[in-house]
Image (spheres, rainbow, N blue to C red):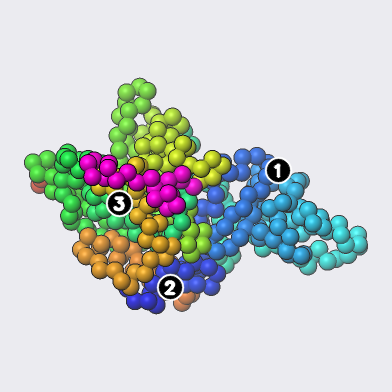
Amino acid sequence: MNAEEHEALVRVGPGTITGELFRRYWIPACLSEELPERDGAPIRVRLLGEDLIAFRDSDGHVGLVDAFCPHRRAPMFFGRNEECGLRCVYHGWKFDKNGTCVDMPSEPPDSLFKTKVTIKSYPTWEGGDLIWTYMGPPADQPPYPDYEYVRAPKSHRFISKTLQSCNYLAALDGGVDTSHSSFLHNEDITTKAGLRSRDGAPNIEVERTDYGYRYVGTRDVGDDGLYCRVYHYMLPTVQVRGFVTKWTSAEKHEVPTIHGHFWIPIDDEHTWTYNWLYSVDESTPITDEWAWNFESWTGRGKEHLIPGTYRLKQNLENDFLIDRHRQKTKTYTGIPGLNTQDVGIQEGMGPIPDRTKEHLGTSDRAVIVARQLLLEAGRDVAAGRKPKGIDPATYRDVRAYDAVVPRGQTWRALARELVAKW
């Protein structure tokens, strides 16, 4: 990667190549749980380098507006959320969710000034326990997101989020890189019992699609056959992970689940990582107890977060609480928690690592193609063309899985059997 390509990929503010690309998709702005009540407290939202304020109005709709009043740039965070609008407490100017000024008490009653003033606002849509927003040109607004996770019933899905102090590309690179799991997430270096640790050099296949690509990492696990992890990468930064697990409910019934991430740039040096999963069995929901136990296992449970935030207690300031003795005797990293191991490496690279100094190999094929697709999509937008993946029809029926495939069979045969239900 040359310096020009790298600069194009990592900058996400208004007017940048990748920033304009992100602005052609619906992207998560916050969790629904962050705006729990009508006329409740507004929250700060920083997204793609822009400072915004989100609020749930009297009708339950969510507004996403400029963080500063267009009058004298007073902070709208301190605004009063009332009667379907957010009122600036400096001079009383009030704006609805669409950015229209609906009251201007500091001006004479017969003044038409309020008809000439608006506050910047972005449309929102609520689905999958998320508040989504579209920040691009109104004429290019695509249909609402239709990932299977979003369609799954509320009783069958779960989502969390964590803050990462690094550029979004470091998180995305780590997510689509399946080979690192043989080392970074090896929780017992004294044995090769884990499937991923039995073959540290998986064969990586990448097949481009209308939404991004489908890819598979195949590991030879000896007499057991071939261990295949089939993923999907969807533009701009969505992953459906090849991790269809089986968990046991209170009824002792094994249920496959699918997991994934949305990596959303806060700005050039910070990222929101949304972690989601859902059950694909209609008869068995996901309980909060099970979901939070899973989050705790990954290292991003409630007890792992700084209270009142979505930031990990283990972070770069305390070296992610690395245990060097454990690293010598038990694991490769000495860092507890699979998710925390990822964040530790990604933040440890620095806010924006210099990728012109990388030396990529065959195991980096998925990383390379993801970057190529982002650059191509960014150029499409710059040229006035629609990028890949904005049409839900291209991605709505995809699923990921991992499985041990007997020799003589192919992962493609299994893939044909996995048809989305929700």
Q: Position of residue 307 (x, y in %)?
A: 54, 40
To which residue does mark 2 refer?
8
Q: Per the image, is 316 magenta?
A: yes
Spot the residue most to the front: 325
Estimate the x, y position of residue 314 in percent, counting from the top left: 42, 46
Disc 1 residue type (three-letter): Asp
Q: Is residue 92 above or below residue 306?
A: below
Determine the residue positioned at 62% across, 58% down: 52
Residue to which mark 1 is pinned: 39
The quarter of the rendered structure image containing the N terminus is bottom left
Kindly report which numbered mark, 3 or 2, lies closer to the viewer in this rendering.
2
- The residue closer to the viewer here, 355 or 35, is 355
Q: Which residue is mark 3?
A: 231
Badge 3 or badge 2: first in the primary sequence: 2
- The amino acid sitting under disc 3 is Tyr
The residue at the point 40 percent across, 33 percent down is 293
**Foreground residue among 125 and 404:** 404
> Does residue 79 appear to the left or right of 106 in the view shown?
left
Mark 3 neighbour density, 10 Å: few (under 14) some (14–19) many (20 or more): many
